[in-house]
Image (tube, grey):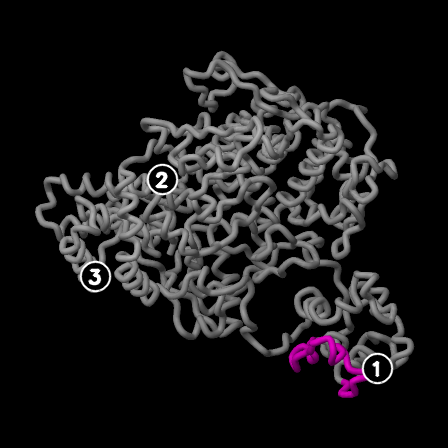
Amino acid sequence: MEKQLVKNFKLSLYLITPLLCIWGLKVLLSGPSSEMSGGQTSLEVSKAVPEIISYNFDVKPILSDKCYTCHGPDAEARQANLRLDKEEGSFGVAKNLSNLPIIKSGDPKGSALVFHINSTDPKNQMPPPDSNLSLSSQQKQILEKWIEQGASWEGHWAYQVPQKAEVPQTKYQDWAQNEIDNFVAAKLENKGLNPSSLAEKEIILRRLAFDLTGLPPSLELMDQFLEDESELAYEKMLDHLMAQPQFGERMASVWLDVARYADTHGYQDDLERVMWPWRDWVINAFNKNLPYDEFITWQLAGDLLDEPTLEQIVATGYNRNHKITQEGGVIDEEYRVEYVADRAVTTSKALMGITVECARCHDHKYDAVSQKEFFSLYSFFNNVDEKGRIEYGETPAPFVTIDKKIAAEELSFLHLPDSIAKVELMVMEEVENLRTTYTLARGQYDAPNQEVQPGTPARILPFDETYAQNRLGLAKWFFDEKNPLTSRVVVNRFWQQFFGRGLVATPEDFGNQGARPSHPELLDWLAVTFRTQDQWDIKKFIKRVVLSATYRQSSKTSLEASRLDPTNVFLAYYPRQKLPAEMIRDNALVTSGLLNGTIGGPSVKPHQPEGLWEETTSGQGLTQYQPDGGVNRYRRSLYTFWKRTVPPPNMITFDAPTRDLCTVERQKTSTPLQSLVLLNDPQFYSAAEAIANKIDTEDTLQTEREKILKLFRTITLRTPNEAEKKLLSDYFDALLSNNEQASENPLVDMALLIYNLDETTQKS
């Protein structure tokens, strides 16, 4: 195989021409992908001034972009002692300038703001000419009209309790499948855009299978779907896929990023840890459709429930997924403080969508989180009797011991193999009055300042006496009907999972510096519906999303849509997306017939470059990587052993995070290295070899052309068109005439090419 890999490296250049031809053909047919289209935000679609001006969605963005640099929250940069980010500051008098009221409600001409933005005198003009900032005519009109309409001030949109908007009517009513589509269509109509028709059946089933199971559908399932012409064909397939145990694996893969799951402790020595039983719990929780409020409550505070079960205690492993050090010479308390801070920051980002870590050293500059509030949140996680530094081979306390008897009787979802007698899993255990929590000057472990009690950012929702002052009280606070963030944040993350980008494009930041929702009414409608109507039922919510016409649209676009909305913010077509790293590898394993579909259990070690751990590890850490033999090499990527300091290189190349910290959105890149992985990684070569040999020996395929078409359809799940057939045929003939470059079986090289296609590595 090693000789073949060297040959593949040479073959890479030879493959580029036909690869680009087919890739280019697919781009022409399917339109631009999300990776090609640029940043997170679209160009302005409409220059018209809204009839009713909203402070949050029309005025505040202008002030934030053009005025806050000199008149915002940064005291050191503030000019003229003027703040436009605060209501009380904005309605004062512009002393030493025009001496007019800064904003005079109902009177634009009497407002200093309007005077200065319209002034042509460099001494009075705002923003100043030397700031390189300027206001468009539309922006000036918006500010004037807002003042004329009364200059109504609103608190930050994300901190207001979501209200269920009335479902709008639209001229695309025949296109709409449910309420989601009404909101999307109404926005498209307003922007002068049209929704797309439904995607072809081959495309939509592949999309749906990847989204619900993380795996492609089988050819048999595809044929069954194509033959079913009933109106319920799609919904039946949806229900079938969601009922598969692979659904839990798919959902778990996203949550592992959020919960920063890994199989090692991190830091320099980076020794192995046992956390996979918690991963088994996550998979099972999604498969049995544990309501989201319980899913989170058990992880935050399962040990504090009345008479908690062992399963609920196992769920609290979520809080212990952070890094832990074994290095000699470190200060124990310094690292213990880091672990507590990590738990607070992770929980905040995962459930509130705000960056509270900024407030660890000082009051948050942009959001309403003080340093005292950060450490009040921190205090919920500060009552664990744990050490900052552990010894080599030590399981950090507190932990539970799970043997085969316990697994069989209490944790039936746990896949404890015969080779392992017992495991020790880190969990949470509350010790009341264990220690007093203080604010820490500059966030330093050895600089206690002011004593604090458990609490939350009051601007979001005060933490009063109705909640217990522990993690269980915090969980109840998150699911209080008055909490404005919890439901918004999770439905936005679900939306991102299916559409590649959330309705709020910054899922980690719902604060003042985060993106504004592209469809605010839809976001709030979904948030309220998920909490009240669905009762936090995850499968019910997901079914609503994937039944929508918005989700089922074709990814083909028009020149008009590309011109008016180049990044497809308003969803005039389905946004094509690069498959996550795990799905790219798993797709090769499934289509080649190599996948070992065993669910759960310890992590496994597929192939990776030899000597990688040895070259990158010092001290007493994990220095020897011994790949698994047999079928364990072909387990789903979800189960790949995750070493924090040296993550699996092929998955990192495809934008998987290191899992050092909570990650709620992966990067999206397209690089030449990704193609080189697909062409040269032994795992993909093994898949190409397996599928080629399988097709080559299939009795029903008599000619080379039949084999090529079967190979293409097995990997892409569709039949090539005539132009593509010719490209494939020409490439195969070229392989036959270039024996030095090709493999012994040219179908192997053909399979490598198809695995490398844009179409194969994307969800369209």
Name the residue located 42 percent from the left edge and 53 percent from the top edge: 578
Distance Cα–Cα, label 2 vs label 1: 65 Å
Mark 2 or 1, closer to the camera: 1
Q: Is residue 673 left or right of residue 428?
A: left
Q: Along the polypeptide, which appears first: circle 2 or circle 1?
A: 1
Kindly indicate the quadrant of the structure image that contains residue 265: top right
Residue farthest to the bottom? 120
Name the residue located 19 percent from the left edge and 47 percent from the top edge: 747
Q: Along the polypeptide, which appears first: circle 3 or circle 1?
A: 1
The disc at residue 727 is 3
Name the residue located 47 percent from the left edge and 63 percent from the top edge: 571
Helix, strand or loop under label 3: helix
Q: Is residue 5 left or right of residue 599?
A: left
Residue farthest to the top? 405
In the depicted view, which residue is nearer to us: 481 or 273?
Answer: 273
Name the residue located 74 percent from the left edge and 80 percent from the top edge: 129
Depicted 675 relative to depicted 260: above or below = below
The disc at residue 110 is 1
Q: Which residue is mark 2?
A: 240
Q: Quadrant of the C terminus?
A: bottom left
Q: Position of residue 39 (x, y in %)?
A: 53, 63
Mark 3 or 2, closer to the camera: 3
Q: Is residue 659 visible?
A: yes
Helix, strand or loop under label 2: helix
Helix, strand or loop under label 1: helix
Q: Position of residue 320 (x, y in %)?
A: 62, 30
Distance Cα–Cα, label 3 vs label 2: 36 Å
Q: Position of residue 582 (x, y in %)?
A: 42, 42
Q: Is residue 60 left or right of residue 11?
A: right
Mark 3 or 1, closer to the camera: 3
Residue range of the region highlighted in magenta in the rendering: 119-142
